[in-house]
């Protein structure tokens, strides 16, 4: 219950989650502040939660959990209640895995083989800096733009393509 007496006025209500797509701004409306979803940047040495890493890589959290089972190099700290905290090294490895799977077209087995043969440090070092430093996927922006896809649509398709590749690798393992 609200501490104020009486019903909330419309301008006092601030939902914690926006379930509806935002409306186009009205012409007479004043400029708005930056979006609330834009998080302040943490220090590079700070630990990240699974949701922060998933948002940064534009993948679902279950994908990160799945990668943990396939890549022993990724070992997040687990705190009370099973909360995962990724070290900066873990985040670099995850960004490398993401780049190899989604951009380079490797399969999970292929990435595992790279880590096994070359070692995680060499593989991470060989990953282009823009793939490790950017939270925007580096996949064919021109083709998507030519197809008339928005950034959100392209990101959703990239996520689906990665999940399909993972499923294909899982099926290949069972055969």
Image (cartoon, helix red, strand yellow):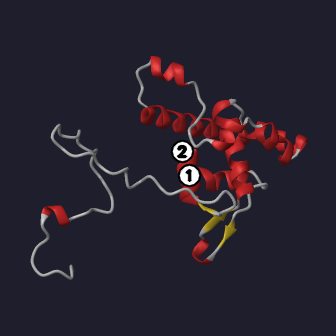
* Viewer-proximal residue among 66 and 127: 127
Residue drawn where x is 64% and y is 52% of the image:
66
- Label 1: how many residues lie within 10 Å, few (<14), some (14-19) or many (20+)? some
Left or right position of 119 against 43:
right
Q: Quadrant of the C terminus?
A: top right
Placement of 116 over or under 102, stated as above or below: below
- Residue 175 in sight here: no
Residue at the extreme left of the image, as rendered: 6
Element type at marker 2? loop
Placement of 166 over or under 104, stated as above or below: below
Left or right position of 13 against 159:
left
- Measured as percent of width and height from the top left, residue 142 is found at 53, 20
- Residue 121 in sight here: yes
- Label 2: how many residues lie within 10 Å, few (<14), some (14-19) or many (20+)? some
The residue that mark 2 highlights is 58
- Measured as percent of width and height from the top left, residue 150 is found at 41, 30
How much space separates mark 2 and mark 1, taking CA atoms?
6 Å
The image quadrant that residue 104 belongs to is: top right
Q: Quadrant of the N terminus?
A: bottom left
- Measured as percent of width and height from the top left, residue 160 is found at 52, 37
* Viewer-proximal residue among 170 and 55: 55
Placement of 48 over or under 129, stated as above or below: below
The residue that mark 1 highlights is 54
Residue drawn where x is 56% and y is 52% of the image:
54
2 and 1 marks in contact (CB < 8 Å) = yes
Residue at the extreme right of the image, as rendered: 117
């Amino acid at each position: 219950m609200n501490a104020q007496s009486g019903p909330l006025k419309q301008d006092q209500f601030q939902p914690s989650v926006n379930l509806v797509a935002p409306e186009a701004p009205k012409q007479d409306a004043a400029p708005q502040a930056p979006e609330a979803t834009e998080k302040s940047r943490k220090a590079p040495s700070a630990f990240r939660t699974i949701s922060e890493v998933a948002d940064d890589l534009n993948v679902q959290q279950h994908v990160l959990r799945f990668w943990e089972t396939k890549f022993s190099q990724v070992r997040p700290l687990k705190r009370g209640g099973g909360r995962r905290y990724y070290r900066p090294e873990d985040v670099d490895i995850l960004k490398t895995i993401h780049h190899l799977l989604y951009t380079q077209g490797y399969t999970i087995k292929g990435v595992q083989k790279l880590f096994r043969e070359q070692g995680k440090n060499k593989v991470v070092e060989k990953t282009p800096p823009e793939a490790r430093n950017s939270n925007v996927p580096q996949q064919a922006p021109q083709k998507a733009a030519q197809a008339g896809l928005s950034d959100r649509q392209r990101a959703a398709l990239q996520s689906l393509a990665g999940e399909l590749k993972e499923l294909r690798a899982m099926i290949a393992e069972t055969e």
